[in-house]
Image (cartoon, rainbow, N blue to C red):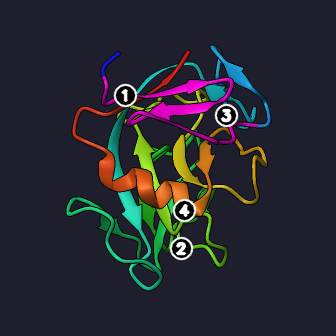
Amino acid sequence: MTPDDMVLTPQGVRFAGRMWPCSIGKGGISGRKREGDGATPRGTHRIVGMLYRPDRIARPTDWAKPIGPLDLWSDDQSDADYNMMVRAPYAPSHEVLRRADPLYDLVILTDWNWPYAVAGRGSAIFIHQWRRPLYPTEGCVAFSRRDLHAIAPMIKYRTRLIVP
């Protein structure tokens, strides 16, 4: 571990000299992550990107990419674009990135099962805003809006999310 790592603990995520309250997947932590199990996968996950809603928030870092109205994330394990960002129209199963609620106004991407996805291992483990305090996710790690927006600019090229 390095000082730049985000480390999940029972109290939250330890990062940048602070403890940040967070929520994890409703399926707990798993060393055998599967599509749809609601678990947060155990392991060391590199941060590989950041997405944001330019109609709602300012660009959080110079390397963040805007989420457009046609941006989706494929969660269809039988499709060649499984666990990749895709654009509408897209018939296979997917998640809309430009949501009506604020959950994905700022999304930090991890390398879980990416870039060469293995069918069934689960798609996209994001770091995003929580629905409400400590409310479980579908496997992602979520923070309060305030904390997520404070964390985002501190992420460096070598930052990793470590889930022991």
Q: Amino acid at mark 4?
A: Arg
Q: Where's the N terminus, which quadrant?
A: top left
Residue 17 shown in magenta: yes
Residue 153 pos. (x, y %): 32, 55
Question: Considering the image in quadrants, where does the C terminus appear?
Answer: top right
Q: Which residue is mark 4?
A: 146
User: Which residue is the site of mark 2?
Assistant: 98
What element does badge 3 sit on? Answer: loop
For the residues marked 4 and 1, what is the alpha-carbon distance in whole angstroms? 20 Å
Q: What element does badge 2 sit on?
A: loop
Q: Which residue is mark 1?
A: 5
Q: Which residue is mark 3?
A: 35
Q: Residue at x 39, y 62 (%)?
A: 51
Tags 1 and 3 touching, CB below 8 Å = no
Spot occupied by residue 43 in the image (x, y as percentages of width and height): 50, 18
- Give the residue at x 54% y 40%: 125
Q: Nearer the viewer, mark 1 or mark 3?
A: 1
The tag earlier along the polypeptide, 3 or 2, is 3
Q: Image check: 111 left or right of 127?
A: left
Residue 52 seen in the current view: yes
The residue segment tinted magenta is: 3-25
- Front tag of 3 and 2: 2
Which of the labelled discs sits on residue 61, or is there none?
Answer: none
The CA distance from mark 2 to mark 1 is 28 Å
